[in-house]
Amino acid sequence: MASTDIESDKAGSGGSGPGTGKPDDLAGLEAGLDALDAVQVQRTPVREVLLRKVLPPLLAVVLVLLVWQVLVWAEVTEDYKLPSPLAVWDSVGDMWRQGTLLEVVWTSVSRGLLGFLLSVAIGTPLGLLVARVKFVRAAIGPILSGLQSLPSVAWVAPAVIWLGLNDSMMFAVILLGAVPSIANGLVSGVDQVPPLFLRAGRTLGATGLRGTWLIVMPAALPGYLAGLKQGWAFSWRSLMAAEIIASSPDLGLGLGQLLENGRNNADMPGIFLAIILILFVGIAIDLLIFSPLERWVLRSRGLLVKN
């Protein structure tokens, strides 16, 4: 009876003899490692999404409109300098009834997206070349950094002289503004790739273009995505600068030209409307394209637990 009690005590405490309790310890260790490796991806309820992601921006917009209206009521300046939100809304209604609102927005958005895609097609191989070839980096790396800091509006005048008042001029300004940002973002991402990844890829036979596609690009994706996001911002700003400065019937009416027309006609509601539309497009592109991409990258790396 005593021996039975002693054996049960040893079994309960894990024991100290050879082989006693080791299978349980290994099983516990494996379970712990599995728990660390497993990322629990839980879908956030719709109500929580609305409260956390939709309600705060709506409250911010309401607050801005309230402050704006209070300033109008307080008559901090003349009416022609600070129109009321209702006056801007009337401008929206006028353009909608005329059928020009969506046309103006689409003119700029289509140019901006096409110019951005061209910038990605040029900036991506350029960034890889600069990141992977030391001579190329030494030669044009500083030039790319300088071009990134150059205001895009500086390119409008020479682009008009070189190409004339047409869409080619618009795309040239977009490319000169966005390509350096995309290339520099990719260079930064490649520089942060651990050398161990590259050695492991070479060991497995992933060299040359295959190694770039399978090892370098996935590992550099966070920096590359940041460069793409900044490249879109530069594309959109470059396009607005070009549309404001260069005007021609052949170019059509875009948001930048709408803003310039408001200035020429001293139409402050029209100016505010153009500014709001430009801001709205920038926010919409970020929410519809770049935010989902960022969440996907984080989730694929186990850095995003909740949606």
Image: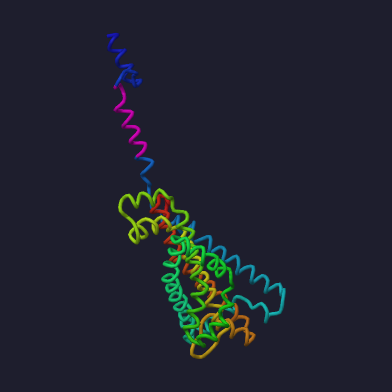
Residue depicted at x 53% and y 82%: 159
Q: Is residue 4 left or right of residue 37?
A: left
Residue 244 x, y percent position in the rendering: 57, 82
Give yes or no for residue 22 being in the magenta stretch.
yes
Q: Is residue 52 above or below residue 268?
A: above
Q: Name the residue: 42% across, 72% down.
A: 117
Q: How many marks?
A: 0
Residue displayed at 40% across by 50% down: 302
Give the image location of residue 200, x and y in percent.
35, 49
Place of residue 169 in the rendered image (x, y in percent of width and height, measured from the top left) = 50, 83
Q: Is residue 91 in sight in this rendering?
A: no
Quick check: is 231 in the magenta stretch? no
21 vs 207, nearest the viewer: 207
Q: Quadrant of the N terminus?
A: top left
Residue 70 shows in this picture: yes
Q: Is residue 32 left or right of residue 248?
A: left
Q: Which stretch appears magenta?
A: 19-33
Q: Nearer the viewer, residue 54 or 9?
A: 9
Q: Position of residue 25 (x, y in %)?
A: 33, 28
